[in-house]
Image (cartoon, helix red, strand yellow):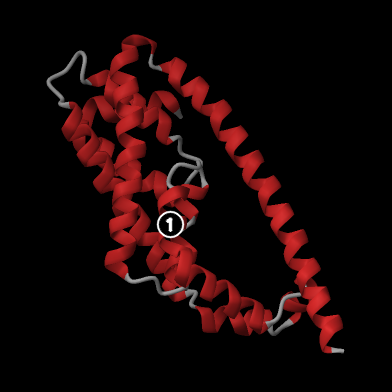
């Protein structure tokens, strides 16, 4: 995979970076850290410019995010509620009001969530789907996505340039970072589910 990415970038330059990053946002398993750090390295032996590498990478990221945002709009809250009202909802112990609460939470904290999730591998792409489902204003989504993504891209591209031919060391470090970030996120998610379930049971007992 890494060799294919490098060959593609060497052949198509800025446009190769844009396309690869756009695809990476739609299919998270494609490693953005390879694209960005090698893009930074390319500025040391080609006429490519750091600012333009970051710009094209950010445009690609936003375009990819918009595709997932549109997918989220297709899977809107009403459709999700209908799914939850079926067997899946009973299996997951979810009710229509749970979707409404989640939607309200995203309405109030969605912008910050979209911004900070841009720094978490895999999640940085998938967060676009709930943003679309909650019908987060499009321009607001694009703004926070652009800013968060630009920061992420800038850090990796600049590190790639600074490290030069040793850019793969950044990729190795980012692999550890990705695992640590996803583990921490998983722990927080489990804790959140436990707390939510506890509050939900307490509320149900109170109603009885």
33 is higher (above) or lower (below) than 22:
above
Q: Position of residue 179 (x, y in %)?
A: 61, 33
Question: Based on the displayed image, in which of its 4 quarters is residue 98 positioned?
Answer: bottom right
198 is higher (above) or lower (below) than 98:
above
Outermost residue, top direction? 165
Question: Based on the displayed image, in which of its 4 quarters is residue 5 positioned?
Answer: top left
Q: Secondary structure at mark 1?
A: helix
| Neighbourhood count class around disc 1 (C-alpha, 10 Å): few under 14, some 14–19, many 20 upward | few
Query: Is 58 left or right of 2, judged from the image as shown?
Result: left
Outermost residue, left direction? 47
Q: Quadrant of the C terminus?
A: bottom right
Q: Which residue is rendered at x = 43% and y = 47% of the image?
A: 118
Q: Position of residue 142 (x, y in %)?
A: 29, 59
Q: Position of residue 26 (x, y in %)?
A: 42, 52
Q: Which residue is mark 1?
A: 112
Query: Is 170 left or right of 37, judged from the image as shown?
Result: right
Front-lying residue, 20 or 187: 187
Question: Based on the displayed image, in which of its 4 quarters is residue 91 positioned?
Answer: bottom right
Q: Which residue is rendered at x = 39% and y = 64% of the image?
A: 69
- Count all numbered tags in the image, as a single digit: 1
Q: Which residue is rendered at x = 34% and y = 21% of the image?
A: 159
Front-lying residue, 45 or 10: 45
Q: Position of residue 114 (x, y in %)?
A: 43, 56
Outermost residue, bottom direction? 208
Q: Which residue is rendered at x = 12% and y = 20% of the image?
A: 47
């Amino acid at each position: 995979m890494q060799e294919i990415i490098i060959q593609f970038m060497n052949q198509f330059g800025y446009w190769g970076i844009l396309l690869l990053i756009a695809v990476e946002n739609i299919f998270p398993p494609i490693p953005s850290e390879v694209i960005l750090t090698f893009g930074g390295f390319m500025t040391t032996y080609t006429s490519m410019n750091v600012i333009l590498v970051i710009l094209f990478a950010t445009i690609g990221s936003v375009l990819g995010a918009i595709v997932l945002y549109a997918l989220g709009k297709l899977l809107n809250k009403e459709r999700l509620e209908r799914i939850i009202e079926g067997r899946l909802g009973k299996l997951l112990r979810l009710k229509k009001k749970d979707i409404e609460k989640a939607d309200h939470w995203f309405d109030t904290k969605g912008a910050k969530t979209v911004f900070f999730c841009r720094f978490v591998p895999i999640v940085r792409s998938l967060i676009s789907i709930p943003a679309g489902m909650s019908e987060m204003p499009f321009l607001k989504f694009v703004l926070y996505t652009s800013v968060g993504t630009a920061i992420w891209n800038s850090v990796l591209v600049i590190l790639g340039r600074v490290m030069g031919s040793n850019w793969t060391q950044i990729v190795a470090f980012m692999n550890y970072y990705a695992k640590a970030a996803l583990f921490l996120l998983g722990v927080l998610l489990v804790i959140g589910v436990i707390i939510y379930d506890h509050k939900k049971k307490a509320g149900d007992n109170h109603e009885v």
